[in-house]
Amino acid sequence: MTSSEADRSSRISGFHKLRVAERIDRVAAFAGLDDAQRAQLAVASNIDAELADHMIENMITTIAIPVGIATNLKVDGRDVLVPMATEESSVIAAVGNSARQCYESGGFVTSMSGTEMIAQIQLLDVPDPRRARLVILERRDEIAAICNACDPVLVRHGGGFRDLEVRIVETPTGTMVVTHLIVDTRDAMGANAVNTMAERLAPDIARWTGGRTLLRILSNLADRRIVRARATWTCAAIGGESVRDAMIAAYQFADNDPYRAATHNKGIMNGVSAVVLATGNDTRAVEAGAHAFAAATGRYRSLSSWEVTAEGDLAGSIELPMAVGLVGGAVKIHPTARALLAILRVEHAHELARIIAAVGLAQNFGAMRALATEGIQKGHMSLHAQNIAFAAGATGDEVGEVARRIIERQAIGEEAAARALAELRGGG
């Protein structure tokens, strides 16, 4: 560590009180940023700096993620254009190509179990856990009234308390009594609503049972909010029986081996998370719920299922929790998210969730077909090569030509791109 590094401290008193420009100056000084790097942090984006400053703590800048449009999707008989925010090459192209190949056979058919979320209240040090469980269940009507009083606006929109579950959870440190509040959050993701209800109810539960409440928080395993999508791809559309059978084998691999399932499901989430992010929803909540759901049987499995139809075609389906909303949080205040939601032309959260499920299934089809045929790298690397060419300084038509040359030479790297660019500009 140099003496200058030793003098640096991340203890910056009152950092949150500084203006954004002042925060940038302090960070630039700490990190030794040059003028170009400092200026980049100050570049305006499509979100107002003052708004961004109120969305998170200690904001200094925004980072732009490209947003593209997935085409060719037909969902429940309606054609949709789907905005996707992602930095990963080939994701959007894969969705569009996959959707095109099942478009004539009807596209995607979807459904959803509901729009209910779960809040958990943890109860410790309960003298009689099984009696406590019954005591809580006996007060269902009282609990419903307490919960609904927390959010009368939600109730006016048809939501609110729906049901009550009480579980006995045995742990190494003792028996816990866990209360689940089942709440219909309608067109909101609902985290704030259910958390408020859990906080309000916790003292009453402690008083009724003689226990001590601790955690009061929603569950991201939103298994009361399951979205489903299915589609059929004809053998002719995907390249014949050999491709179909190879894709079935790829699915069986994922469904029976957690090492493969992790990457298989990550591919699904490439599509899912891109739409969730573009619409201002919580990618971490959706991802956590999806992976927990994938392990609900006791082992980690594929989120999708694939089979051969009676006609010999390939049928795929997907089921996963989908806690997304159209109101509240970043969805409500982020202007780009609002504009992208307008492209989708959805009026209710369940419509958005169903489109997202269709995108996840399309993404899964595209990845499996690529893996089962030419391999994932062919399509992915062609786009990656363009990124490498751009990073090497290529512009305009040079990008495509440099990318073509380095792919042809099987040397996809910055040094190879720089050499190809020099040759191109030198007339080589």
Image (cartoon, helix red, strand yellow):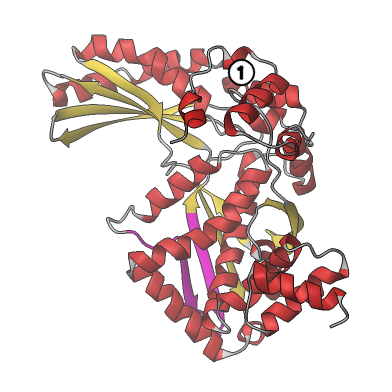
Seen from the viewer's position, the closer of residues 95 and 129 is 95
Seen from the viewer's position, the closer of residues 179 and 11 is 11
Residue 157 visible within the image: no
Instruction: Give the amino acid at mark 1.
Output: Val
The answer to whether residue 200 is above or below residue 295 is above
| Residue at x 62%, y 61% (from the top left corner) | 109
Residue 291 located left or right of residue 52? left
Residue 159 visible within the image: yes
The answer to whether residue 411 is above or below residue 383 is below
**x, y percent for residue 248:** 46, 79
Q: Which residue is mark 1?
A: 153
Please give the range of residues in magenta: 300-319
**x, y percent for residue 84:** 69, 52
**x, y percent for residue 97:** 70, 71
| Residue at x 83%, y 77% (from the top left corner) | 424
The answer to whether residue 73 is above or below residue 205 is below
Residue 317 located left or right of residue 329? left
| Residue at x 49%, y 36% (from the top left corner) | 116
Q: Quadrant of the N terminus?
A: top left
Query: For the image shown, how many numbered marks are present on the structure?
Result: 1
Residue 45 located left or right of residue 281? right
Q: Quadrant of the C terminus?
A: bottom right
Is 311 a magenta residue?
yes
